[in-house]
Image (cartoon, rainbow, N blue to C red):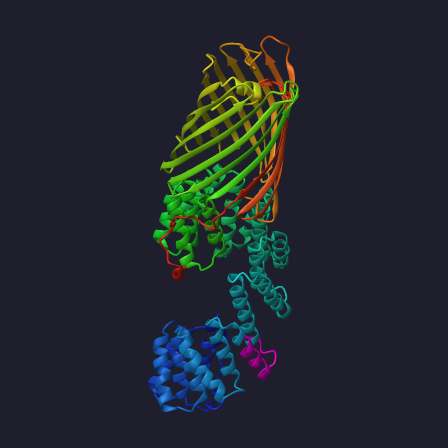
Amino acid sequence: MTNKVLAITFLFLFTVTNSLAQINMQKGFKMLETGKNKEASIFFENVLEQEPNNKTAKVCYGRAVGLSGNPDKAINIFTNLLSKYPNDLEVKLNYAESLLWSKQFTKAKSYYKKLVDENPTSFSALLGYANTLSNLKEYTDAMSYINKALEVSPGNPNAMVSKKYIRLGHAYKYQQEKKYDEAIKLLDDNLQDFKLDKQTLLNKTNVYLIKNEPAKAKEAYKLIATNPKDSIIALNGLALVSHLQFKDKKALELAQNAHFKVKKFENDTLLTKQTKERYIQALIWNQKYKVAGKEIDTLLAKKPNTNWILSLHASLATYKSDFKESIADYNQILKNDPKSFDGNLGGANAQLANGNEKKAYEAAYQTLTIFKEQKDALNFIKNLDLNFTPFVEEKIAFTFDNGNNNAFSSTTTIDFPISFKLKATASYQFRTTENTITNSKATTNDFTVGLSYKIRPKISLNANIGINSANSFSNDFTQLLLQAFVKLKPLKLQDLEIGYKREIQSFNADLLDKEIVADNFYINNNFSTNFNLGWFTQFFYTPQNDGNTRNLLFTSLYYNFLKRPVLKGGINYQFLTFQNQVPTIYFSPSKFNAVELFADLLKDEKTTKPKNWFYTVSGAVGYQFIEEDPKQLTYRGQVKLGYKFSDRFLANIYAQHTNIASATAAGFKFTEIGFRLKWYFLSKPIFKTHNFKKEDL
């Protein structure tokens, strides 16, 4: 920024005093003024061959050499001139500027300070000092001296340009410090002096996006569209805003419009690249993977191993759950450019999706060593920390049915991650149940502890052991509780769980009194797709200690209509059979079938930001067929409303009601009302998640 401004503002104060020089140097001056610095260096080198002591030619030669990419040589030229003309202000000013070309900003600062002290009304000294301070990110002092320069030369266009960039730099510093309101004020000040300035507006949109204020970013993008080319920039930005507002169809519409318009500006390679990139991103957001893939393949054929194209390829692979391919792309990006933001943070996201949290941490912290205080990287780490931070959860529930059974329960669960692979859990439940007609009462105390161990990123083993202590109206007993299961991902879009669970049938007091132990052997399997369709299946084989055996099959075909809030719906089918029918003890048909249509609408608590509400509304209606009885209409509904007080504390209430026979042991209408609290009682994981030092970040 500074070099460009100073090059523009080069003052040939000595031109007039040297107008009688033997050689006409106007042609060389013109070269410098128009930025033809290499040609100017050759021109003035020729002049010096004829007039080696021509001070003006030496100054101009030094400027031409420095501005054409050889600042050290320029410094030597001006150092020699200073030894010959130690009190010449023009030589001093050019020497000071050459320090800026060489990026010796600290040295330039002290030198300019002396110049300003000696020449407090020198516009060039004040301007150079202001730009030096700006390069050192000392923006408050830089603004003070640029204002002094404008007092000397009111409205000077070059000083005003410097003032604009000082504000932009200061606003960016405020942005990094999360002082967003201060940043916006500076940018608004810029817009007062430079109405509808594109750079300022783009910086303003970026601040609004970081503040998660997409509506304000949208208004700023609209102001950018003052000509056909800038309207394309605006459309690209508006497409991103629409995506952040979860309006992906609108995002694609805007991106397609920009993609069409940019054809008129094919010579503008940067704008063409940005527009093509946003268009492909919008295709990916809308799950148009085949079209996006063809576009990316075409680009790779023309420009293989190009980072921004590889980043698109990696993004497409991530959306398609091809995480290994995505990681390979990001690794190649880092091989090309170790400081690539996409390569580092994109790789972190891919590693996390692939189940390797340790590598995800490493990539995220590596991002912070390059991009200090970068918001996306900080948020990524904060969210990842929560996955490994101990928490306690309390759930209180009251249930009742039309068989006059009531129950109250309190369940406390502690989740305690010990390392990336190992997690411990403990749970205690106190439950009382009674029948208000028969006055049958029972109380249970369940205590369990468990461990979960991740063998590989996509395979984990889980085991729980506990004690159930029951006191009923005619029977007191203690039973062992067991559960063991394995979770794995055999295919990239498959989640499989196979397990065993030993439990006590305890829905009501009469059933608990029978001390029926159920050994559940089960399998849960879920297949998802890249086109929003999913299929979940669950099967239980349950022998019981009363000699009975249960088989339960549940399967659900569903479709995801919306991503946020999540809206999905589909059809469920359930089949239930018992080997022996003991209807006087519990619901145990020889044949039970149920089919229903369902819909779920939810705002997930994990993705909900602090100080915001989350919710679930779900319902289903269908028919059940018990034995050979006529079909019966069924329904069920559930609502949940919660509030996230902070990243570490949330609460919700919920209620559910159903008349599906298999929902309870007796087949009655059933209602549950509850309250839940979740608190991350530690602020971070107890184990070391990375090897980076704080001073490096």
Residue drawn at x 57%, y 76% as measured from the top left: 157
Between 685 and 413, the one lying in front of the other is 413
Residue at the spot 59% in from the left edge and 32% down from the top edge: 397
Q: Is residue 490 left or right of residue 184?
A: left
| Dominant SS type (magenta) | helix
Residue 74 coordinates in the image, percent (x, y): 37, 78
Count the labels in the image. Answer: 0
Is residue 346 among the parts visible in the rendering? yes
Q: Which of the 4 quarters of the picture holds residue 562?
A: top right
Camera-side residue of 210 and 621: 621
- What residue appears at the point 47 percent right and 76 percent down from the top-left corner? 132
Q: Which residues are magenta?
A: 143-158
Query: Does 276 sit above or below residue 11?
Result: above
Please determine whether, in this image, residue 231 is positioned above or below residue 636. below
| Residue 305 appears in the rendering | no
Q: Is residue 536 magenta?
A: no
Q: Position of residue 324 (x, y in %)?
A: 38, 40
Left or right, 555 with respect to 480, comes to right
Specify whether 250 is left or right of 317: right
Q: Position of residue 228 (x, y in %)?
A: 60, 56
Question: Which quadrant, please, contains the C terminus?
Answer: bottom left
Residue 12 lies, in percent from the top left, at 48, 84
The single residue placed furthest to the top in the displayed view is 628
In the image, residue 225 sits, relative to residue 457, either above or below, namely: below
Q: Nearer the viewer, residue 662 or 141?
A: 662
- Above or below, 122 relative to 522: below
Which residue is found at the position 54% from the left and 42% from the top?
Answer: 678
Viewed as shown, does residue 208 lie left or right of 684? Answer: right
